[in-house]
Image: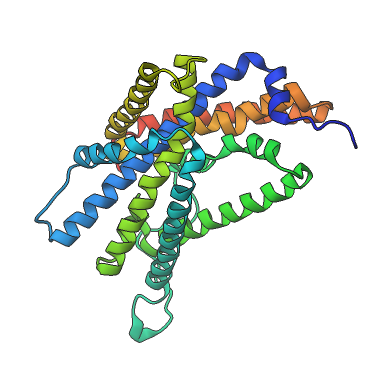
């Protein structure tokens, strides 16, 4: 009980050193993918706001908005100390929470109060599939796995806790709340708008000054959160390119690192342009390719190699890794085959 505390991150790194480059590549690709998805969301949301406010007199193209998104992100990504981005996290969290509350309010209003004169009246959207959608269920699976985008922080948070014995309870509570929020917002939105539901949920809201404000607030939140999301990828790529070189005493190296960071932002915006026409399938592909290994395959293999001691534990690890591999290959194939077709 009084012995030295063993950090799981260090234990896994020592037990599976050969997998470290693979994991770092997966984390980098996934974080860039998340920023791509968020940037496409910004573009679609901002396009709608500009069209509504100008009464269709002004239209911004997706490349134009992604260009300005990259310009907005570039100065933030030059910040070296992530602690200095804490204000960004606070602001974006408040704006995101405001947007979620607004979504739930308008979904409930559309679902139960579509006709104020009739009082409470359950009125679901058109053409709802209540049981199973054989056409786009693979897109749903990939999108569901996408929700594991924060999986890379699990072990660092555990290792940083003063009382790690409480971590399982904290993790369980957080996962339950996240699952509840996703299910509530997604379920209400689908029941409220049915087949007319938009990939960007805010586009389902009725036009008006309040909704425009909410859309802009959510757009600002997404733009701010991009800086935090891409930060791990930038650090990993920067360390791989420059090794131990530092720009603290060498201005040339510092500016080389700055150019690399801006270059990563530019590459991210170009990738976002590719997926802009099919956001739901693009998100599904990101979830399938990037999140499945990080959430299902790698943790199982690490637990098998570094922690599992009983035959039952090892069988569970192998089964979960095989399941994750199947999910990844299946959803990538089916989602890619549906690219360009309406969901």
The image position of residue 138, as x and y in percent, is 46, 38
> Which of the 4 image quadrants contains residue 125?
bottom left
Tell which residue pokes out farthest to the right in this image: 1
Q: Position of residue 338 (x, y in %)?
A: 35, 34
In percent of the image, x 40 and y 60: which residue is there?
Answer: 99
- Quarter where residue 307 is shown: top right
Q: Residue at x 43, y 70 (%)?
A: 108
Say whether residue 319 is left or right of residue 147. right
In the picture, the quarter occupied by the N terminus is: top right
> Residue 228: x, y in percent?
45, 40
Q: Is residue 269 above or below residue 40?
A: above
For the C terminus, the quadrant is top left
Q: Is residue 264 above or below residue 118?
A: above
**Is residue 73 visible in the rendered structure shown here?**
yes
Left or right of 108? Residue 150 is right
Q: Position of residue 304 (x, y in %)?
A: 73, 24
Total marks shown come to 0
Is residue 135 visible to us here?
A: no
Residue sitting nearer the eye, 300 or 252: 252
């Amino acid at each position: 009980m009084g012995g030295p505390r063993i950090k799981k991150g260090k234990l896994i790194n020592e037990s599976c050193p050969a997998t470290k480059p693979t994991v770092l590549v997966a984390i980098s690709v996934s974080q860039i993918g998340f920023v791509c998805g968020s940037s496409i969301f910004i573009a679609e949301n901002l396009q709608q706001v500009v069209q509504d406010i100008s009464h269709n007199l002004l239209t911004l193209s997706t490349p134009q908005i992604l260009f300005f998104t990259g310009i907005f992100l570039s100065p933030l990504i030059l910040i070296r100390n992530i602690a200095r981005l804490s204000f960004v996290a606070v602001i974006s969290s408040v704006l995101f929470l405001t947007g979620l509350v607004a979504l739930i309010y308008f979904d409930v209003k559309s679902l139960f109060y579509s006709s104020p004169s009739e009082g409470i009246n359950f009125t679901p959207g058109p053409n709802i599939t209540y049981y199973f959608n054989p056409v786009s269920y693979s897109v749903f699976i990939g999108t569901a796995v996408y929700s594991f985008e924060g999986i890379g922080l699990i072990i660092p948070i555990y290792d940083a806790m003063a009382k790690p014995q409480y971590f399982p309870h904290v993790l369980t509570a957080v996962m339950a709340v996240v699952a509840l929020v996703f299910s509530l917002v997604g379920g209400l939105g689908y029941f409220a708008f049915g087949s007319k539901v938009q990939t960007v949920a805010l586009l389902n809201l009725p036009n008006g000054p309040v909704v425009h404000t909410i859309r802009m607030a959510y757009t600002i939140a997404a733009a701010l959160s991009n800086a935090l999301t891409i930060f791990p990828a930038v650090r990993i790529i920067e360390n791989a390119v420059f090794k131990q070189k530092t720009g603290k005493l060498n201005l040339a190296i510092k500016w080389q690192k700055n150019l690399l960071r801006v270059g990563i932002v530019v590459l991210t915006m170009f990738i976002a342009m590719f997926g802009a026409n099919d956001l739901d399938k693009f998100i599904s592909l990101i979830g399938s390719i990037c999140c499945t290994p990080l959430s299902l395959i790698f943790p199982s293999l690490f637990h098998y190699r570094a922690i599992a001691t009983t035959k039952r534990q090892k069988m569970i690890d192998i089964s979960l890794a095989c399941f994750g591999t199947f999910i990844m290959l299946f959803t990538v194939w089916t989602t890619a085959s549906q690219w360009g077709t309406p969901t």
